[in-house]
Amino acid sequence: MKLIIAVVQDQDSNRLSKALVDNNFRATKLASTGGFLKSGNTTFMIGTEDIRVDRALQIIKDNCRSREQLVSPVSPMGGNADSYVPYPVEVEVGGATVFVLPIEQYLQF
């Protein structure tokens, strides 16, 4: 048994949720916030048998894509302003960050 924890961008959340249900995966969705851009994410917790892990990972990969986003930098306060860029910069966001963990015991009450 494995626990898959997938952190995805909110824009991909509904599509991934539907794909998981269509493929008979149960998942718990949690609202989360990214540390880098302080933007909304969704964290999926998916419990599955070892033989279905590759299928779950493929579903995540197929439904979560990266994209470019403009980000306005925060001005430095009391720090070195030499490296400060005063205009928005484009960064790559999205995709999925996935952890696969072994599970010793699974109980459902």
Image: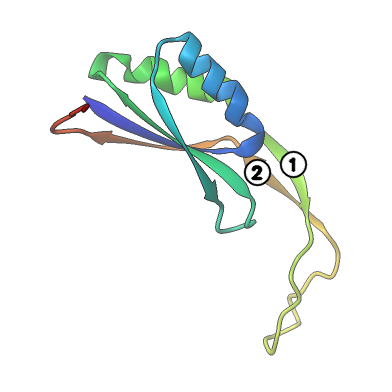
Residue sticking out furthest to the bottom:
78
Which type of secondary structure does the marked residue at label 1 adopt?
strand
Expressed as whole percent of the image width and height from the top left, the position of residue 36 reads 59, 58
Q: Viewed as shown, does residue 37 lie left or right of 43?
A: right
User: Which quarter of the image is occupied by the C terminus?
Assistant: top left
Q: Earlier in the sequence, mark 1 or mark 2?
A: 1
- Residue 108: x %, y % from top left: 22, 26
Q: Where is residue 4 in the image (x, y as percent from the top left)?
A: 35, 31
Is residue 82 positioned above or below 22 on the image? below
- Relative placement, left or right, of 5 versus 21 is left
Cβ–Cβ below 8 Å for labels 1 and 2?
yes
**Quick one: which residue is furthest to the left in this view?**
104
Amino acid under label 1?
Answer: Glu
Left or right: where 42 falls relative to 44: right
Q: Which residue is drawn at 61% across and 22% down?
A: 15
Q: Distance between the residues labelled 1 and 2?
A: 6 Å
Kind of residue at badge 2: Val
Q: Which of 63 and 33 is in front in this view?
A: 33
Crowding at dot 1, Cα within 10 Å, few <14 / some 14-19 / many 20+, comes out as few
Q: Is mark 2 on a helix, strand or loop?
A: strand
Q: For residue 46, which numbered disc appears in the image? A: none
Q: Alpha-carbon neighbours of circle 2 within 10 Å: few (<14), some, or many (≥20)?
A: some
Where residue 20 sits: x, y (%)? 47, 17
Quadrant in the rendering for residue 24 = top left
Label 2 sits on residue: 93
The numbered dot on residue 68 is 1
Q: In which quarter of the image is the N terminus?
A: top left
Residue at 73% over, 76% down: 83
Compared to residue 36, the image places residue 14 above or below, namely above
